[in-house]
Image (cartoon, rainbow, N blue to C red):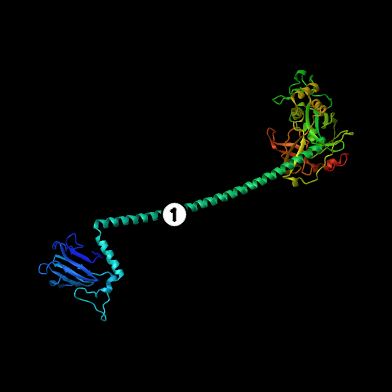
Amino acid sequence: KTRIFTQEHVTMGTSDACDLKLVPEEGGSLPDGVLADIYDDESTFHFVPHLEQDRFEITINGEHLGNDQTGSGHTLHDGDIIHFGHGLGSASVLFQVMPENFSATHPVRRNVEVDRVSGQSVHPLTATLFVKELTASLWAEIPRKAKLTGLTLVAALLLLVLGITVFSLVTLIRSTNKTDRIGDQIALVQARREQDQELIRKQQEEIERLREVSDQMRKFTQKIAELYSPGVCLIVGSYTFVERGTGRVLRYETADRVSDMPVDKSGNLQASVDGVGPPVQIDYTGTGFVVGKGVIATNKHVVQPWATDQMAEIILHQGGGLTPKLDTLEAFFPSRQAPFDLKVAATSPRFDIALCKFEQGEAALPIFPLSNEDPHSIIGEPVVLLGYPTGVDGLLQRIEEPERREILRTHGQSAVEVASGLASRGLIRPLTTTGTVSDALPGRIVHSAQTTEGGSGSPIFDRDVRVIAINSAILATVDGNQSFGGSNFGVPIKVAYELLQSVDREKPGAHP
């Protein structure tokens, strides 16, 4: 152990009251009480033993001390080793002077051997050595249990610091990875957002384009309706069946069978030329439009309706020797209260086109401009149709119930009578439908403008406000039981030019 003293008098012994308590080697013992004193006399140190040499052995650097008769003791030098006793009952003390007192001491002596260099001794003690020895001494002062406890605490603290460091590092790595993942997700969300925004932008552009197309189509339709509705006529006709040679008319068997159909559900004819009831008369409707002064264009089956009527086919097949006879063919124009009688002027041997003449007089009716375009060039183009789908029934459905009942009550039930009642009230107005050309075939086009029976003969306009075709039929199965309302057929007006040239009429009008 290392003890540092700054006082001028230091006592040495085994008593607890001594400044420096001597501890004998393990298993030995020393006399009780104060064994010696050390005095500092102006940096000269004197060692004064308390026991006589013959009673207790004390050596300095291995040399026995004689009895001090003067009481001034023996002079100590820096580095002297004081040894108390011998054997197991002994203790040793190394006497050293603090560095600041080196100048006042003599050269160091260790035991009986002293190193001398060039006649002058250099003391080996330095500040570093002193600090090391001081530290070692202090460490030796600490009890073993305290050392173990301290080391344990230090180790625990180091483990704690290491654990915290590792945990912080792992947390940092996880946080960095999480941050990277979040960054990737944010980038992905941003990319998707940009894609969505681009899609929305394109959709908005498409909506805007469709809105513009719809607006243009609406204006286009309004323009056609305003300009040419007055020149679209409702054609109402009726025909009977007469016997060849005799001219006798096919009649119902009795007067009470008038409400029945001339052909029953089994396909049997319920009328004959010998019947006593009214004649079997079939009413029908169609559409036509003005292509020259006093000339209208329509379908061939409108002026020869029996050619496409299944009931008429049954009657002609079972009647034996019967032939159809057109009795009534009239044209009702909007804003005209009286109809015009039509006369068939020409029919096409190849196409479903017919021309009719009428006495127009001073009636102001627009002449429709005709297109000479190749039908294939208009595929995908928008079209407008003006006509009378469902004929007089459709016109009746478009008016109020009281007025409809009044017309039926005052004018009768036949198609011609009902049409006359509607015309007298200014209720003849064509319907306008729109669509596109979906296909072009030899002698016909396919379009999607909605129509049905009664719309045959309707003009079909292109975007240049010219008639490109005449509506002729709806798309249906061969047996006629099913139809597809999304597609209808029309005859290109171009194929009708030869027929038009054969009729004495004014040149087709130009687009106003």
Query: In the current view of this chain or complex, which residue is farthest to the right?
Result: 361
The front one of 169 and 403 is: 169
The front one of 362 and 316 is: 362
Badge 1: few (under 14), some or many (20 or more) residues near its Cα, within 10 Å? few
Residue type (three-letter) at the residue carrying disc 1: Leu
Q: In this rendering, does residue 328 appear at all?
A: yes
x, y percent for residue 108: 24, 74
x, y percent for residue 361: 89, 33
Q: Is residue 48 left or right of residue 339?
A: left
Residue 240: name its quadrant.
Answer: top right
Q: Is residue 115 left or right of residue 402?
A: left
Above or below 127: residue 190: above
x, y percent for residue 23: 18, 62
> Total label count?
1
Q: Residue at x 57, y 51 (%)?
A: 191
The front one of 341 and 332 is: 332
Q: In this rendering, does residue 445 appear at all?
A: no
Above or below 461: residue 99: below
Q: Is residue 401 left or right of residue 245?
A: left
Quadrant occupied by the N terminus: bottom left
Query: In the current view of this chain or complex, which residue is farthest to the left?
Result: 54
Query: In the current view of this chain or complex, which residue is farthest to the bottom?
Result: 118
Residue 152: name its quadrant.
Answer: bottom left
Provide the residue designation for mark 1: 172
x, y percent for residue 135: 28, 64
Q: Residue at x 30, y 66 (%)?
A: 131
Secondary structure of residue under mark 1: helix
Above or below 397: residue 68: below
Quadrant occupied by the C terminus: top right
